[in-house]
Amino acid sequence: MTRTLILGGTAWLGREIAEQLAVQGHDVTCLARGESGAVPRGVTFVRSDRRLPGAYDLVAGEAWDEIIELSYDEDLVAGALEDLAGSTAHWTLVSSVSVYASNAEPGADEDAFLVEPSNVDDYAHAKVAAERTTAAAVGERLLIARPGLIVGPGDLSDRFSYWVSKLALAPGEAVLVPNAKNRYVQFIDVRDLAGWLISAGQRGLTGVYNAVGSEHELATVLVAAARVAGHTGELVSAEDDWLTAHNVNYWAGPRSLPLWLLRSDSAFARRSRSRFLAAGGTERNLQQTLEDVLADERTRGLDRKRRSGLTQDEQRLLLAEISA
């Protein structure tokens, strides 16, 4: 049995890690404000605001086999390292493939150039700063995991889940999609990522890994999502220039077509995963993830307000314009 401290653990990935550890019978503690949800059964919860003095007093005196840091906030990362770096045999930092300076080279690996962290208010810059600060404090005990798009049940970003939900919401109606030719999607199911992070920590794995899934053609994902959703309507394809001219955003956020990337950034979804596979990384198939996501989305409401994608009214107006 291992003793793991998760800095976070009440939100999505952290909660999945905590739940899997608890099911396996390990001793797991989550330190967080607890505003993102409750910890799983069998997990010790330490309520703490990491921005306040003494935030780690209740856990700093303990000896841990593993500490997992989920934050990229410079102050939070540095504060945890100051109080806890010497208390654990192994430290895992969950970073991101957003740290890379270029998204133009398909197959680029973990040795590609990173952005220079000149603005820690920027997500990518903050992640690089977190990596460097953690490496300086933890040294050879450090594992840095760089996932890309994380998907699966419980996702609040709506980037991946938008499509199967949109297709299921009106299964006989037309749905607007980007031109999918020569476009790719790369993602990892949250359950597979959590499982690998747990295993890697228990094995004492160190170094840097792109914790990403296989490359999928975007067209393949859209067709598979339509099949799972039972959608029989038309998929209406729009070109990049037309979408941007009509103020449709790419990748995520309001009034967007999620997963659509500009061609200049296409390699963001084509990162090398060779090192991850060699270290035991696995993934469930696309069909299973889509089915599980749709089941979760039906429970939460297919017509709920979303963080990413087009509303039904926005899509209806755009389809009317493109047909005209």
Image (cartoon, rainbow, N blue to C red):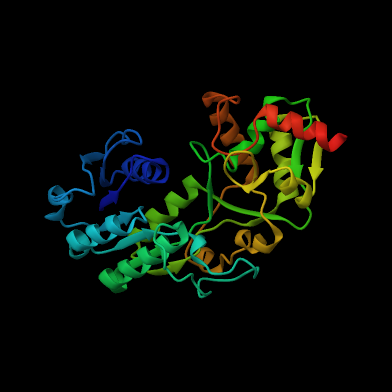
Position of the C terminus by quadrant: top right
The answer to whether 192 appears left or right of 137 in the picture is right
Name the residue nearer the viewer: 233 or 197.
Answer: 233
**Vertical placement of residue 136 versus 285, above or below:** below
Q: Residue at x 20, y 63 (%)?
A: 82
Q: Is residue 275 visible?
A: yes
Q: Residue at x 52, y 41 (%)?
A: 157
Q: Residue at x 71, y 41 (%)?
A: 224
**Vertical placement of residue 183 versus 18, above or below:** below
The answer to whether 312 appears left or right of 95 in the picture is right
Report x, y in % for residue 246: 73, 42
**Vertical placement of residue 208 versus 44, above or below:** below
Q: Residue at x 73, y 35 (%)?
A: 227
Report x, y in % for residue 137: 26, 70
Report x, y in % for residue 163: 66, 38
Report x, y in % for residue 4: 26, 52
* Label tally: 0
The answer to whether 265 appears left or right of 73 in the picture is right
Q: Is residue 205 visible?
A: no
Name the residue nearer the viewer: 317 or 94.
Answer: 317
Name the residue nearer the viewer: 157 or 220.
Answer: 157
**Vertical placement of residue 296 versus 266, above or below:** above
Name the residue nearer the viewer: 243 or 136.
Answer: 243
